[in-house]
Amino acid sequence: MKALNDDLQMRSDWLFPLCTGEERLRNTHGLKLHPTQKPEALLHRILLASTMAGDVILDPFLGTGTSAAVAKRLHRHFVGIERHPAYVEAAWGRIRRQKPAPPEAMEATPTRRDAPRVSFGSLVERGLIAPGTPLTDKQRRVAAQVMADGTLSCGPHRGSIHQVGAAVQTAPSCNGWTFWHMERDGALVPIDVLRDT
Ligand SMILES: C[S@@+](CC[C@H](N)C(=O)[O-])C[C@H]1O[C@@H](n2cnc3c(N)ncnc32)[C@H](O)[C@@H]1O
C-alpha cells in the first residue's frame, strides 16, 4: 500500500472521485445502468492490499461487476452473486472486455519485510548506533546528531534521516542511508553499512 502512495504510509480514510465518465455503465437511453457502481480505483486498491495474484475474490453483491473486472485485470479469480439479471449481463460484458494486465506488470515490488533491512530508529533502539553520534555528509559540509528517538537533529532541522538529508540540501528528497556518514575506524562510512550488521 505504501508503494501505491509514493512510499508514504497510506491513510485509513480514502478519497476517490465518484464513478463517472467512460467508466460509468449506461443503458441504451444514456442513463446510469446501476445506481451505485463503484470506482475501479477503489477495488484496485482493495484487491492489491488484501489479496495475491491467483486468489479467489467473492463479491456477494456484484452489481455491475466492478470487483470481478478488477480481479481479472489483476490476475485474481472471482465469484460473484447478483440478483438482477440486467446487472449480471452488464457485469459479464464488462468482465469480457477487461484485459488482464501483462504478467510482467504483476510482479510485486519487494517490501522492507522481504528485505533483510531495518529502519534507522530500530538501529538506535538496538544500540547499533548510539544517541548523540555525530553524522555528516561525504564532504563534511553539514553536521547532524543522532537523537534517541531515531531522528536526526541538524541546526533548525529535525526529522528522519531522509527528511533532514533533503532539508540540508534543499532537495525534494534524499536517501538518508547513503547521504549520511559516520566515523568508523578512522574512515567516513555511509550509515547504510549499519543495515548489514
Ligand atoms: C451496492 S450494489 C453493488 C455495486 C457494485 N459494487 C458495483 O460496483 O456495481 C449491491 C448489489 O447487490 C445486489 N443484491 C442485493 N441483495 C442481494 C441478494 N440478496 N442477492 C444477490 N444480489 C443482491 C443488488 O441488486 C445490487 O446490485
Image (tube, rainbow, N blue to C red):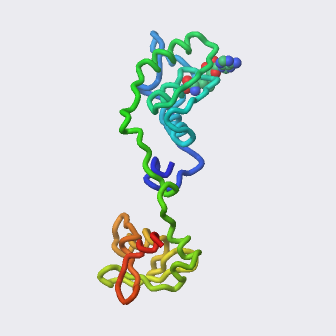
Q: Quadrant of residue 85?
A: top right
Between residue 159 and residue 79, name the one nearer to us.
Answer: 79
Question: Which one is in front, 121 or 66?
Answer: 121
Question: Among all residues in the image, which is located at the extreme bottom?
Answer: 186
Depicted 188 relative to depicted 89: above or below: below
Q: Can residue 33 be seen by looking at this rendering?
A: yes
Query: 86 above or below 157?
Result: above
> Residue 125 falls in which quadrant of the image?
bottom right
Q: Position of residue 157 (x, y in %)?
A: 45, 77
Q: Is residue 36 at all visible to an observer of this figure?
A: no
State left or right for residue 125 relative to residue 180: right
Q: Where is residue 145 shown, x and y percent of the image?
A: 47, 83
State the residue lying farthest toward the front. 197
Horizontal arrangement in the rendering, residue 187 relative to residue 86 (left or right): left
Q: Is residue 109 above or below residue 156?
A: above
x, y percent for residue 89:
52, 12
Which one is nearer the viewer's eye here, 104 or 10? 104
How many marks can you see? 0
Ligand 1 sits in quadrant = top right
Residue that lies at the very extreme toward the left in this rendered image: 139
* Residue 140 horizontal/vertical position (percent): 33, 84
**For the point 57% across and 29% down, which residue is it?**
56
